[in-house]
Image (spheres, coloured by chain):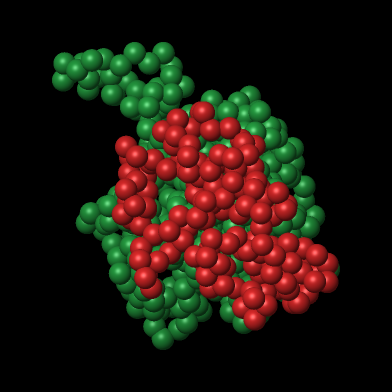
Chain colours: A red, B green
């Protein structure tokens, strides 16, 4: 596992395998999700992989009705909004993610700070398979 | 910042222009820039031969995407007969124009050039809204766009974090919208020169004429609460929280301070200039502020020796209503958590103690992204020189004005302070 570079491609590969992975600076212990090749706190470049437990809380969110084409292709539009948010992981780092299992047409009912657990959304098949990081109410 | 920021030599603005902003089927980027260029040259009190322009810096975010044409530096150079002298395009998303301005300032400050044209243009209205949304989303962080965040989406999420932290709500955002719509009718270049009240009255009038059910809005906020009149885009951002899709151009002429008086008796001097950068939402230490704005402001204040209270009027990057409120705090005009209260109390109105976005802001003046940075400074040029007409702020002895430009979702932020010395 340590042979994998600390970059976006590795992060995406792990998501395909249903693992949410971050990098931990071996010098100062700073955690980054997605992984970073250079520590932004101490500029160290010795990293190790750490798997997140996949638990967190909702730190910010939005319910989007005017969607970009790739989301429209997934069935979202003005009548079918979706929720995207920022999740604060139990380990301390924050990640951007889709928020599933909430009613995006009733944003008033979505509670900031609500406990969430990870969900991996697979899209496409074979070489075209992509995995979107999502969270849903725990 | 280890050492003091300063320019190698002083730089002044001696001319400025902008096109009318709007959605124009019959005008391209070249036409719009030309409108701004003609006005800028004509505004130079003692005249200037465009042959004296040493170099061009031109801001454009993504005409590559919007009209399928890149490489705008030489296109603009060729347009105004500037070939073979240099022309450089700058890109910093919605802050592309401010980056052109900065490059122009540094090129003169270094002693390399004496006279520089800076400006920008963007042509966004040729595509349908969904495609423009996709084009703008190119400037979000890759981690944001991957999980569906659009531009309004990132600012919507930022709003939920701000609301949760400080107890603000949608009603407070409406005050920003109403204020910008009150200023815009006084600006002949604005894309939406209509107050919310006049928009309401016009819709009521149309409904009566057509024999439709006549809406019963009690006041502006009641109108803005109506999901039919003001639909959600990316909650809590609704249509009237968002700057529009626009076409437009802007232009300024910068010269070395020592020759400024050859062109005008009333040049404006660049006394503070700052720029910061930021990561995406997930990388922010604080979701309810823009660190890049704070850094840009720190640089500009330090260079100028000025404090936020010294700034007598400011154009603030209000791509979304929440952005204006948070930036008022990041620029130091109000304490964190106090920005929304200040707007509610009318402190940022045209005749208030801290006039903000007298032009109508991006919301109403329009936001052709590459043109915006220099167009914001154009408003400060007009105000400081007492040429803002009906929207002239009543402050006596105007001396310091500033403009804040943001690119992407806070990835690039600039802050520029101009001074009038006589």
For residue A24, above or below residue B219: below
Which quadrant holds the N terminus of chain B?
bottom right
Tell me which corner region of the image, top left, top right, bottom left or bottom right, holds residue B134. Answer: bottom left
Tell me which corner region of the image, top left, top right, bottom left or bottom right, holds residue B340. Answer: top right
For image coordinates 77% across by 63% down, the residue present is A30
Can the viewer see residue B288 in this picture?
yes
**Residue nearest the observer in this picture, B281 or B326:** B281
**How many numbered marks are there?**
0
- Residue B9 drawn at (x, y percent): 71, 72
Left or right, B257 with reference to B81 = right
- Residue A7 drawn at (x, y percent): 60, 73
**Residue nearest the observer in this picture, B211 or B252:** B211
**Residue nearest the observer in this picture, B74 or A109:** A109
Question: What is the residue that sits farthest to the bottom in this orientation?
Answer: B84
- Residue B194 drawn at (x, y percent): 37, 32
For image coordinates 52% across by 70% down, the residue present is A13
Left or right, A92 with reference to B226 = right
For image coordinates 72% across by 72% down, the residue present is A48
For residue B314, above or below residue B278: above
For residue B286, above or below residue B177: below
For residue B339, above or below residue B91: above
**Residue nearest the observer in this picture, A123 or B233:** A123
Left or right, A67 with reference to B328 = left
- Residue A119 drawn at (x, y percent): 52, 51
Can the viewer see residue B96 in this picture?
no
For image coordinates 70% across by 65% down, the residue present is A50
């Amino acid at each position: 596992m340590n042979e994998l570079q600390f970059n976006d491609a590795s992060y995406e590969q792990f998501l395909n395998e249903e693992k949410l992975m971050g990098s931990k600076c071996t010098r100062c212990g700073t955690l980054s999700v997605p992984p970073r090749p250079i520590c932004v706190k101490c500029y160290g470049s010795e990293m190790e992989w750490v798997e997140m437990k996949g638990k967190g809380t909702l730190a910010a969110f939005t319910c989007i009705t005017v969607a970009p084409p790739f989301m429209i292709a997934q069935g979202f539009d003005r009548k079918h909004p979706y929720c995207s948010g920022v999740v604060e992981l139990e380990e301390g780092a924050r990640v951007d993610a889709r928020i599933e299992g909430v009613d995006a047409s009733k944003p008033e009912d979505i509670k900031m700070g609500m406990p969430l657990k990870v969900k991996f959304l697979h899209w496409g098949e074979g070489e075209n398979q992509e995995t979107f990081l999502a969270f849903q109410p725990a | 910042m280890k050492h003091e920021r300063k320019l190698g030599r002083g730089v002044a603005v001696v001319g400025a222009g902008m096109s009318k902003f709007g959605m124009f089927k019959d005008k391209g980027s070249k036409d719009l820039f030309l409108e701004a260029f003609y006005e800028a040259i004509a505004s130079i009190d003692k005249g200037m031969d465009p042959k004296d322009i040493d170099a061009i810096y031109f801001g454009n975010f993504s005409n590559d995407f919007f009209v399928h044409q890149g490489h705008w530096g030489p296109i603009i150079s060729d347009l105004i007969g500037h070939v073979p002298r240099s022309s450089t395009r700058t890109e910093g998303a919605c802050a592309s124009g401010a980056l052109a301005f900065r490059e122009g300032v540094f090129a003169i400050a270094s002693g390399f050039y004496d006279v520089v044209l800076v400006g920008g243009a963007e042509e966004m209205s040729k595509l349908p809204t969904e495609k423009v949304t996709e084009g703008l989303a190119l400037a979000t962080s890759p981690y944001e766009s991957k999980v569906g965040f659009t531009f309004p989406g990132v600012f919507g999420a930022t709003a939920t974090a701000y609301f949760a932290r400080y107890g603000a709500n949608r009603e407070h955002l409406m005050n920003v919208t109403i204020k910008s719509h009150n200023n815009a009718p006084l600006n002949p270049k604005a894309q939406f020169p209509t107050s919310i009240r006049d928009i309401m009255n016009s819709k009521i009038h149309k409904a009566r004429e057509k024999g439709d059910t006549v809406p019963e809005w009690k006041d502006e906020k009641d109108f803005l609460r109506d999901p039919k009149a003001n639909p959600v885009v990316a909650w809590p951002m609704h249509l009237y929280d968002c700057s529009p899709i626009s076409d437009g151009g802007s232009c300024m002429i910068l010269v070395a301070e020592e020759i400024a008086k050859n062109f005008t008796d009333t040049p404006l001097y660049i006394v503070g200039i700052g720029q910061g950068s930021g990561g995406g939402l997930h990388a922010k230490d604080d979701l309810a502020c823009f660190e890049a704005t704070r850094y840009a402001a720190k640089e500009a204040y330090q260079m100028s020796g000025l404090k936020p209270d010294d700034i007598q009027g400011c154009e603030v990057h209000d791509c979304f209503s929440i952005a204006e409120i948070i930036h008022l705090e990041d620029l130091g005009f109000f304490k964190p958590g106090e920005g929304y209260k200040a707007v509610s109390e009318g402190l940022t109105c045209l005749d208030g103690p801290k006039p903000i976005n007298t032009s109508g802001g991006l919301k109403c003046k329009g936001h052709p992204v590459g043109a915006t940075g220099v167009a914001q400074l154009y408003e400060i040029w007009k105000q400081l020189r007492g040429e803002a007409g009906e929207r002239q702020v009543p402050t006596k002895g105007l001396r310091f004005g500033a403009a804040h430009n943001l690119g992407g979702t806070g990835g690039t932020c600039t802050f520029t302070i101009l001074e009038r010395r006589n």
